[in-house]
Image (tube, coloured by chain):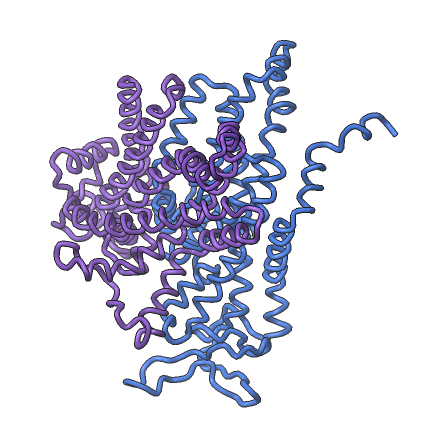
Chain colours: A blue, B purple
Amino acid sequence: MSLRDEVSTGPWRAAFGQLVRSRTALAGTAIFLVILIGCLLAPVYASRIAHTNAFRSNISGTTVVDGATVPVLAHSSTGLGLGVTPIGPTWDPEHYFLGSDNQGRDVMARLLYGGRNSLYIGLTATLICCLLALFIGVVAGYFGGPLDAVLSRFLDVLWSVPVYLLAICLSVVLLSGGLSAGPIHLRAGSLWVPILIIAVVYVPYVARPIRGQVIALRSREFIQAAIGVGASDWRILRRDVVPNVLPTVVVFVPLMTALSMLTESALSFLSVGVQPPDASWGTIINDGLGLLYTRPAVAIAPGLLIAATTIALNLLGDGLRETLDPGARLQGGA
Amino acid sequence: MLMFALRRAASAVLVLFAISVLVFAIFFATPGVDPAARIAGRNADQATLAQVRHSFGLDRPLPVQYVLMMRHLFIDRDLESFVNRGAKVIPQITQAAPVTFSLVLGAAVIWLVLGVAMGTFAAHRRGTVVDPFVMLLGLVGVSLPVYWLGEVVNLVTQSRLHDGLFRWVPPLGYVPLTEDPVQWALHLLFPWLTLAVLFAGIYARLLRSELIANLNEDYVRTARAKGISERRILIRHALRCSLIPMVSLFGLDFGALVGGSALLTEIVFGLPGVGRLTFVSLQNIDLPVIMGTVMYAAFFVVLANALVDIAYARLDPRVRDA
């Protein structure tokens, strides 16, 4: 056995060991994984269990409740007889478990498909946001001077427009015409529109604490020593600075994912996020608004899933924070 | 101290200027976005488009358009909507502002009381089951999408239990305070509670961690050694220090909400506030109104930022030279 193995297990491994002993962090991870796997299995549920197509309307279809065949959309018998009432929750996984929306589509199947988009957007936006923020924070904090001044003012400006207003502004513009700038071509209805918007608007929230940390690190002895022996900036950044701020970024990931998902759902709820025919938990809540007083399950179920996912990610984030970086903090928005 | 305040004010003005350029650029200079096409409708021919461009001044160079818009907004104060021609932007904002202010003010009182109570209680009972339970409650509050919670509240108070327990809940909408204070409060009660749930959770969680950090400080040990009761240490010593970071957080949250961040709550509860005005103007791509409302929002955020920084410099002299 070498000396190295004896002295230390390394900070990441030690943190991991502590993390698996934290019951709340494990519970959070377990809930998140259950939701994630459930959503990934959406096509299996739709084709094998419910035998339905979550994206095709089924206005004149029928289904089976307690052995009896009933229409999915019942014509209203009260008032003028106009309008239809979709079938409510049957609690039968094979036939409209959570009922149908006003186009006769299976809400349960749509929830699972919608969850794929919500989670995909949340995770991808977080990844892009954290990488961007890491880059900006490290460069601004390490090089300082005019470069820092420019980057910090840029962050200040982004920070000073309320997140939701900025996100909605960008969405409205990109949804009306898409984006074609240089090599990037975005279709107006693409999932990348909300992903990029969410990634950009939250950059200051992650970049600012990282920049502060890098500035503090820069005056520490080991970095001064590295500069003193003539190590290149690139080497110092790669070997000394980035590894030291990485724990903060890792702590931010689950918290940011939760925040990104909440933001995506709000944008989709306002119909400036995910565009039909795609669905997300936010768009399903929006679909359910018209049915709120007759078939509340359509709007309530996706909200519960959003809340469960957010709680799970926060539990995981809290656990990570305790093990890796007690100082890191992230605040939410309305 | 005065120099610090002046420097801070100057940078605030600079940030506001940059935001106005940013928002202008988003709507006027994004490739593939043509405001004239939006105004003229989907199938307008070239002649109509040219006419629209000319009549709205969209055929001038971008910097000229920007300067003209800013002049109409800030100096002449007569900027007009693109969509409802003749409707002035500034009166629309001043009409909506009291609604938003009423909503945010009431919610802020509730969330501060709830947040401080929950945070202090959890820190006081740490080590027992009460602490994680209260914190889980806070986490649930943080995790519920605010617009969804609002809809569920509407479902319960406007429909399901409206004939029983919630008979007294008025229909959605807003009644000015000057018209009928009781109806004002009744109309706003559930919007207040809904908006407060989110922030109460955030503040309770933050305060608890601050309190627990402070309770490990030397000055608390000194106080204990002097024989001061644990309750008095918690409230008179630790809580006072722990409230400082809350003050800055509160300033920023309050500024953003007054500026229009409460738009989801406003939309769900049918309150004609600034947030809803912004959202409606965004849906119509009504650029002058968007410009007005976003500048209004940015003003409050920047103001809150500056005030928080100055308050901090007052509390902690080390910040002044940073």
Q: Where does the image place residue A43, in percent across and percent down from the top left?
A: 61, 66
- Pick the front one: B307 or A268: B307
Q: Where does the image place residue B244, in percent across and percent down from the top left?
A: 39, 33
Residue at the extreme bottom of the image, as rendered:
A68
Residue A183 seen from this side: no
- Pick the front one: B281 or B159: B159
Please give the name of the residue rendered at 37% of the width and 45% of the height, measured from the top-left corner.
Answer: A170
Please give the name of the residue rendered at 38% of the width and 43% of the height, measured from the top-left corner.
Answer: A163
- Pick the front one: A226 or B62: A226
Residue B105 seen from this side: yes
Relative to B138, does residue A238 appear above or below in the rendering? above
Relative to A156, does residue A298 appear above or below in the rendering? below
Total numbered badges shown on the rendered structure: 0
Q: Where does the image place residue A300, in percent across and percent down from the top left?
A: 45, 66
- Image quadrant holding the N terminus of chain B, namely top left
Q: Where does the image place residue A311, in percent across and percent down from the top left?
A: 53, 53
Relative to B144, does residue B310 appear above or below in the rendering? above
Relative to A104, does residue A312 appear above or below in the rendering? above
- Image quadrant holding the C terminus of chain B, namely top left
Q: Quadrant of residue B239?
A: top left
